[in-house]
Image (spheres, helix red, strand yellow):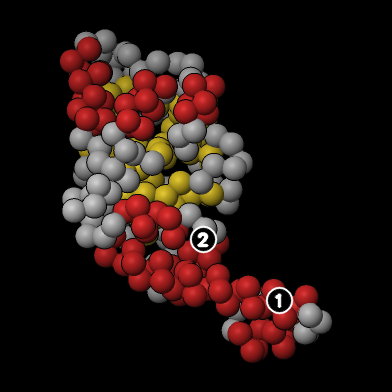
Amino acid sequence: MSSYQNPAVNFDVDEVCRRFSVIYTGAISDVLDEMGYRNQVLPPAIQGLTMDQKIAGVAMTVEGQPTDSVDPEVIYIPILQMLGDLKCGDVIVSQPHESLSAHFGELSCESARFRGARGAVIDGGARDIDYILKLGFPVFCRYRTPTDVVGRWKVVSYGQPIQIGGVGIERGDFIVGDKDGVLVIPKEITLQVLEKSEEVVNTEDLVRKAILQGVHPVEAFRKYGRF
């Protein structure tokens, strides 16, 4: 069995991540639209910590809620359990339901990276940005803050279905993100979307080449069916 086999999916995560890493999210979004999945893009406020960050991997869903507890058993143990259950190729995808705290930081990053995770997508905040960037771990989030979660936020579940911006996300769905944003590919169609997206990129290369050779854009569109 490949070291990148992830029990949440039935394909080689390393190979699929490699192939998705060279496909821009615009092409994937177009394919999802054409397949009838028209609400798969996360809110545009969720952006990478830097413009050059890319993310691709299997969703490990996390849900949290506000709390005033300062008990380490309430605050830290659920987070540590989730981090300890990460598999190679996972991407943490968190719906914190809270907008004051940093829901991801350097120690979580170190733990996730060590266990083979490929990034994090947080509908909330992150901190320790300098350390995270030094580690080269892709993090997409809404905001940055030094505020800790103690007395403010806790994890209530992971590996269960969540929603971010109206987009449903399940454990095992595939996550892709780049400069344009982050989208979610339902697990049952991941390989189909990958193949179709590769076809789109190849076709768009032909359109680009034709236009640069002087072909009228309308003619190029009618020939290749894309623009």
Three-letter amino acid code of the residue under disc 1: Lys
Residue at image mark 2: 23
Residue 100: percent from the left, percent from the top? Answer: 44, 23
Three-letter amino acid code of the residue under disc 2: Ile
Seen from the viewer's position, the closer of residues 72 and 135 is 135
- Check the picture and name the quadrant holding the C terminus: bottom right
Q: Residues within 10 Å of mark 1 (few under 14, many from 20)?
A: few
Q: How many marks overall?
A: 2
Residue 38 position by quadrant:
bottom left
Identify whether 110 is placed above or below 189: above
Residue 178: percent from the left, percent from the top? Answer: 53, 49
Observer able to see residue 129: no
Observer able to see residue 13: yes
Seen from the viewer's position, the closer of residues 116 and 165 is 116
Residue 142: percent from the left, percent from the top? Answer: 50, 35
Residue at image mark 1: 209
Residue 6: percent from the left, percent from the top? Answer: 23, 50
Residue 194 position by quadrant:
bottom left
- Residue visible at 37% across and 58% down? 16
Seen from the viewer's position, the closer of residues 164 and 94 is 94
- Residue visible at 81% across and 82% down? 214
Q: For the view shown, which residue lies furthest in the right direction?
A: 214
